[in-house]
Image (cartoon, grey):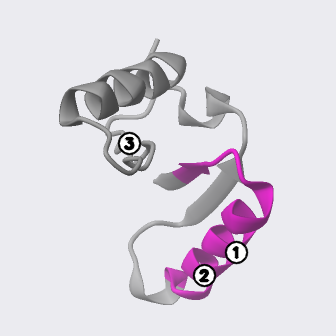
Amino acid sequence: DELALVDVMEDRLKGEMMDLQHGLLFLKTSKVVADKDYAVTANSRLVVVTAGVRQQEDESRLNLVQRNVNVFKCIIP
């Protein structure tokens, strides 16, 4: 099994990958891969998306949802 991370922020991605690699002794996962390209998630059985934009001051929840829908459209084919 493999854990794949995707992030557009390369420095944060590298740090997250290194943190998880240090904990591999305690996990059943044998490998952690990280990339800016969503191709690393090909054939995944489970995908967790934790992406979104922050709500701006005085922004309506409806507008926030629409902006987040646009983010998800870029991620999910």
Mark 2 vs mark 3: which is more N-terminal?
Answer: 2
Q: Is residue 2 magenta?
A: no
Q: Residue at x 65, y 69 (%)?
A: 17
Location of residue 49 (image quadrant):
top left
| Secondary structure found at label 3 | loop
* C-alpha gap between disc 2 and disc 1: 6 Å
Q: Amino acid at mark 1?
A: Gly
Residue at the disc numbered 1 = 15
Q: State the residue at coordinates (46%, 11%).
A: 77
Q: Can you give x and y, in whole percent of width and height, for residue 67 in the image? A: 41, 26
For label 2, count other residues whose C-alpha is less than 10 Å away and answer few (under 14), some (14-19) or many (20+): few
Using residue 4 as the reference point, say whether residue 68 is left or right of it. Answer: left
Gap between marks 1 and 3 measured at Cα: 18 Å
Pick out the residue farthest to the right. Answer: 11
State the predominant SS element of the stretch in magenta.
Answer: helix
Q: Few, some or many C-alpha atoms within 10 Å of disc 3 (few <14, some 14-19, many ≥20)? A: few
Disc 1, SS: helix
- Residue at image x 70%, y 74%? 15
Q: Nearer the viewer, residue 15 or 62?
A: 62
Q: Amino acid at mark 3?
A: Val
Q: Which residues are magenta?
A: 4-24
Q: Is residue 12 above or below residue 34?
A: below
Disc 2 marks which residue?
Answer: 19
Relative vertical location of residue 11 with respect to residue 53 in this rendering, above or below: below
Placement of 74 over or under 45, stated as above or below: above
User: Which residue is most to the front?
Assistant: 58
**Residue 35 appears at what percent x and percent y?**
72, 46
x 51%, y 86%: residue: 23
Residue 62 placement (x, y as % from top left): 21, 27
Residue beneath disc 3:
49
